[in-house]
Amino acid sequence: SDHQLIYPPHPDQMDWSSLYPDYVVDEPQEQQTPGPETPSDLDLAPLRPKRISKEVEVADIGCGFGGLLVALGPLMPDTLVLGLEIRVQVTQFVEDRIKALRVQDQEAKLYRNVGVLRANTMKFLPNFFRKGQLSKIFICFPDPHFKARKHKQRIVSTTLNSEYAYVLRPGGVVYTITDVPDLHEWMVQHFEAHPSFERVPEEEQEADTLVNVMRTETEEGKKVERNKGQKHVALFRRLEDPAW
Ligand code: SAM
């Protein structure tokens, strides 16, 4: 349950170094504790996470077994990509999958930019990401929660869309895909009704190569393909905040 989940109190305190060890910045100790060493400085020193040279820019919400993640890694080698998954064993599986791929592709240094984190994305997303930090959020085949009384568990809602809007930069895009027509309608309705988002026109959507990657590389996408099911795609662009 959530009790075992650990959240940084603020994105600055998130330690990304174990997820992306190749990006850790070597900082001399003195630089980490500037000024006179007061007792409070000393108390804080162990809390200061190791810095990495880039920030996570792409998030896959409910990444499952990580098919999309490991496809995106080599496609955007200069971008840090993060999968977020709530199930312990599934997160562990993805972690092992990434580790194995990194060893396999040691020479090419692929997959160093891909990481996975166990988290409940319905809570504390702004604890991990600064305002406007992300350029892309993928929400692929989210659990449908069919019954009306379960709709509040859907990971697209008015409240959660405000969190996605907070962590996404203007111009950034939310990618959604599902095989459940009712859930597709629900996601379109909720994003279109939100003042921070507009739907990306279909022509532009189909010209985005990542849309096909999402259709074909997610584990669920493959399953739907085998069952000859329908895949409904919708993309939403984060708008600029209005000037006050
Ligand atoms: N995106 C993957 C794909 O397309 O193959 C997996 C889809 S699967 C149907 C939905 C995934 O979302 C599951 O792995 C589930 O554990 C995860 N999930 C559900 N609610 C979540 C939450 N609140 N936070 C993080 N992950 C969640």
Image (tube, rainbow, N blue to C red):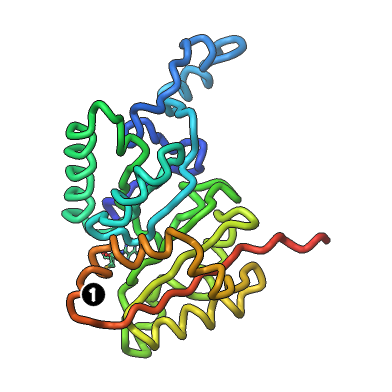
Residue 152, how many percent across, how many down?
Answer: 41, 79
Q: Between 140 and 47, which is closer to the camera in this rendering? A: 140
Residue type at mark 1? Answer: Glu
Q: Between 31 and 235, which is closer to the camera in this rendering? A: 235
Q: Is residue 112 visible?
A: yes
Q: Residue at x 47, y 10 (%)?
A: 28
- Residue 112 falls in which quadrant of the image? top left
Outermost residue on the right side: it is 244
Q: Is residue 47 visible?
A: no
Residue 54, how many percent across, how many down?
Answer: 49, 33
Which quadrant does the N terminus fall into? bottom left
Residue 1 vertical position relative to residue 41 in the rendered view, above or below:
below
Residue 86 vertical position relative to residue 81 in the rendered view, above or below:
below
Q: Residue at x 38, y 64 (%)?
A: 212
> How busy is the neighbourhood of tag 1: few (under 14 within 10 Å), some, or many (20 plus)?
some
Residue 14 vertical position relative to residue 128 in the rendered view, above or below:
above
Q: Between 27 and 220, which is closer to the camera in this rendering? A: 220
**How many marks can you see?**
1
- 195 to the left or right of 15: right
Residue 157, how many percent across, how many down?
Answer: 49, 75
Which quadrant does the C terminus fall into? bottom right
Q: Secondary structure at mark 1?
A: helix
Q: Residue at x 22, y 49 (%)?
A: 94
Q: Residue at x 23, y 28 (%)?
A: 106
- Residue 84 falls in which quadrant of the image? bottom left
Q: Quadrant of ligand 1?
A: bottom left
Q: Between 108 and 41, which is closer to the camera in this rendering? A: 108
- 216 to the left or right of 77: left
Query: Residue tagged by mark 1?
Result: 225
Residue 235, how many percent across, how many down?
Answer: 51, 69
